[in-house]
Image (cartoon, helix red, strand yellow):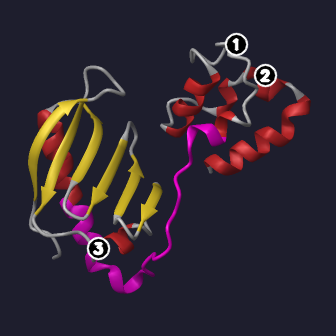
Amino acid sequence: MYLQAIQLLRTQPCLAEPGKIVVVGQPSQPLDEVLPFLATLPNVIAYNPHGPALTFRRERGFLTLYRDQVVITQVDDHERGVELLAALVDAINATWDSRHELIAITAPKRSLRPLDLWALLPQTNCKVCGAATCMAFAFGLIQRQYDLDECTPLIQEAARAAQLASLRAMLG
């Protein structure tokens, strides 16, 4: 076992989604040694071994692990935040217990940025996808709130096939 617990330090309003909260916790010991192994897991969108900091995409929002702190965004309420912290302890310990089967990640991994996606979108701000702008759609793509197929100009215009292929590759 690597970690005993993650103590809830505080919650604060989530600016990305009104009505949700951000949960901030403190692990019972620094996460330096386990982060390179956690970086091998799915849904990692950014890893900085020099920080160290590791960010995962959640169903809604993000989970970021620092040496001495954990931040989870877009959480429903305090109780759910406590549940997520407990589940995270289990996941960290399971990864640590399996570390001999994993190859630790030592190189940085840069997260996908909204501007990376926006540059390949039609930039028409047509709102057909349901987002107010193409930039809002790009943010939604990263958070998995939207799907590329919802961008009608991108899907229907044959001249945009290369852009569509690039976006699909970037988003996995």
Disc 1: which residue: 126
The mark total stands at 3
* Nearer the observer, 95 or 6: 6
**The disc labelled 1 sits on which kind of residue?**
Cys
Nearest to N terminus: mark 3 or mark 1: 3
* Nearer the observer, 72 or 135: 135
Comparing labels 2 and 1, the label whose residue is closer to the camera? 1
Residue at the image point whose x is 19% and y is 62% from the top: 68
81 over 146 or under it: above or below: below
* Nearer the observer, 50 or 117: 50
Per the rendering, the mark at residue 59 is none
Per the rendering, the mark at residue 153 is 2
Under tag 3, what secondary structure? loop
Nearest to N terminus: mark 2 or mark 1: 1
Residue 69 visible here: yes
Per the rendering, the mark at residue 34 is 3
Query: Which residues are the magenta region?
Result: 89-116
Horizontal and vertical percent position of residue 139: 53, 32
Extreme-front residue of the structure: 50
Mark 2 to mark 1: distance in Å? 9 Å
**The disc labelled 2 sits on which kind of residue?**
Pro
Residue at the image point whose x is 56% and y is 48% from the top: 112
123 over 102 or under it: above or below: above
Residue at the image point whose x is 35% and y is 61% from the top: 53
Q: Are marks 2 and 1 in contact (CB under 8 Å)?
A: yes
Left or right, 137 with respect to 91, comes to right
Nearest to N terminus: mark 3 or mark 2: 3
39 over 79 or under it: above or below: below
